[in-house]
Amino acid sequence: MRDFLGMGGYALWVWSAFGLAAVVLVANVIGADRRYRNTRRRLRLRMNRAGSLRQ
């Protein structure tokens, strides 16, 4: 197990690459969620304004 985690002397590079990839993936998911929520909020406001103009 220690040999596997050591990656033949390249552990620093390998694990930092895995860590960076994980950070990018998490940031991508969080960013998409924020954009989705913001878009829904803006559409809801636009629909409410459009509904109040008809009355």
Image (tube, helix red, strand yellow):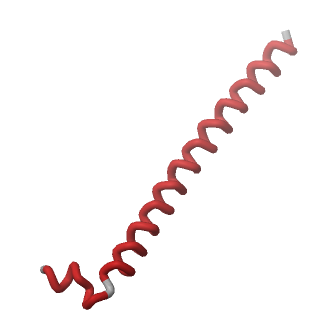
- Residue at x 82%, y 21% (from the top left corner): 50
Along the viewing direction, whichever of 33 and 6 lies nearer the viewer: 6
Along the viewing direction, whichever of 38 and 26 lies nearer the viewer: 26
Whether residue 32 sits left or right of residue 44 in the image: it is: left
Image coordinates of residue 44 in percent, x first then y, are 69, 27
Q: How many numbered discs sit on the rendered protein?
A: 0
- As drawn, the residue found furthest toward the left would be 1
- Residue at x 46%, y 56% (from the top left corner): 26
Q: Which quadrant does the C terminus fall into?
A: top right
Whether residue 16 sits left or right of residue 4 in the image: it is: right
Quarter assignment of residue 6: bottom left
Eyeballing the image, is 12 above or below 37?
A: below
Image coordinates of residue 45 in percent, x first then y, are 73, 24
Eyeballing the image, is 26 above or below 33?
A: below
Image coordinates of residue 38 in percent, x first then y, are 65, 36
Eyeballing the image, is 7 above or below 18?
A: below
Whether residue 18 sits left or right of residue 48 in the image: it is: left
Along the viewing direction, whichever of 47 and 28 lies nearer the viewer: 28
- As drawn, the residue found furthest toward the top would be 55
- Residue at x 32%, y 86% (from the top left corner): 10
Quarter assignment of residue 40: top right
Whether residue 23 sits left or right of residue 42 in the image: it is: left
Image coordinates of residue 8 in percent, x first then y, are 25, 90
- As drawn, the residue found furthest toward the bottom would be 8
Q: Which quadrant does the N terminus fall into?
A: bottom left
